[in-house]
Amino acid sequence: GAVVSQHPSWVICKSGTSVKIECRSLDFQATTMFWYRQFPKQSLMLMATSNEGSKATYEQGVEKDKFLINHASLTLSTLTVTSAHPEDSSFYICSARDGLQYNEQFFGPGTRLTVL
Amino acid sequence: GESVGLHLPTLSVQEGDNSIINCAYSNSASDYFIWYKQESGKGPQFIIDIRSNMDKRQGQRVTVLLNKTVKHLSLQIAATQPGDSAVYFCADGYFGNEKLTFGTGTRLTIIP
């Protein structure tokens, strides 16, 4: 149980295009989902917290107009990287909190984004 | 945890030996601590957690030690196996608040 999936697992796009990444909780309802970014050989940096049915809360320094987050249902959150540039190339990881296990977050497998 | 930049500490351990991975955290108010394992190209996997009212907690082959005085956390892995090779991250936060701060990470390599 407590499986989180991400799609796609990797994507290559041209500079200036937008890319959408999906995060799904497969066997539980996630009231809260988190989006992280991880550069090579670095730690996970929290980008935003997404609550179902409300606007996401972004961490300082993260552009909300560039990284659009939608959490339309209890099992799906999406992150759209708009007008992507090479510096946006990174490993994007989502996690979801099971409302029954208050503090435990379950992580997705990550999405590798490469912007050419 | 403290994310201090590009240098990922590494630790090499002979298979079957015990390993100890250390982590420093900066927020003295944190009361919840977690260790994650991340294999290459995958998301973090929960290993073990501990709350601030404890200084030691044991799981299967793993033990977490918490020293709040010096804001230090350690993960002990007993009888290491090749499958233990991964990057290990500590994370800290507040129990009841979902936000976590991840540490730098340590790459553990098990030598056959």
Image (cartoon, rainbow, N blue to C red):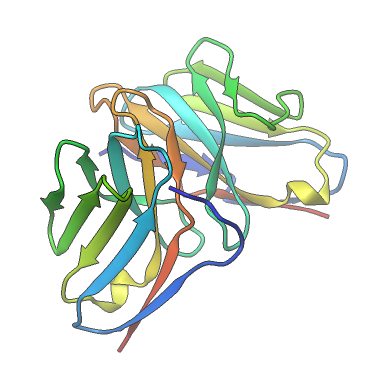
Q: Nearer the viewer, residue A58 or A72?
A: A58
Q: Residue at x 48, y 65 (%)?
A: B40
Q: Is residue A75 visible?
A: no
Residue A111 pos. (x, y %):
58, 48
Q: Quadrant of the C terminus of chain A?
A: bottom right
**Residue furthest front in the image:** B69
Residue at position x 64%, y 29% from top? A60
Where residue B93 sits: x, y (%)? 37, 34
Height in image: B40 above or below A19?
below
Rendered residue at 32%/66% (across/down): B21
Q: Is residue B46 left or right of residue A73?
A: left
* Extreme residue toward the right, this view: A16
Q: Please tell me whether residue A29 is drawn above or below residue A36 in the rendered image.
A: above
Residue B30 in percent (x, y) is at 34, 34
- Going by the image, does B28 lie left or right of B7? left
Q: Is residue B41 visible?
A: yes
- Drawn side of residue A38 relative to residue B83, left or right: right
Q: Is residue A93 left or right of residue B90?
A: right
Q: Is residue B78 above or below residue A27?
A: below
Pick the residue in front: B34 or A10. B34
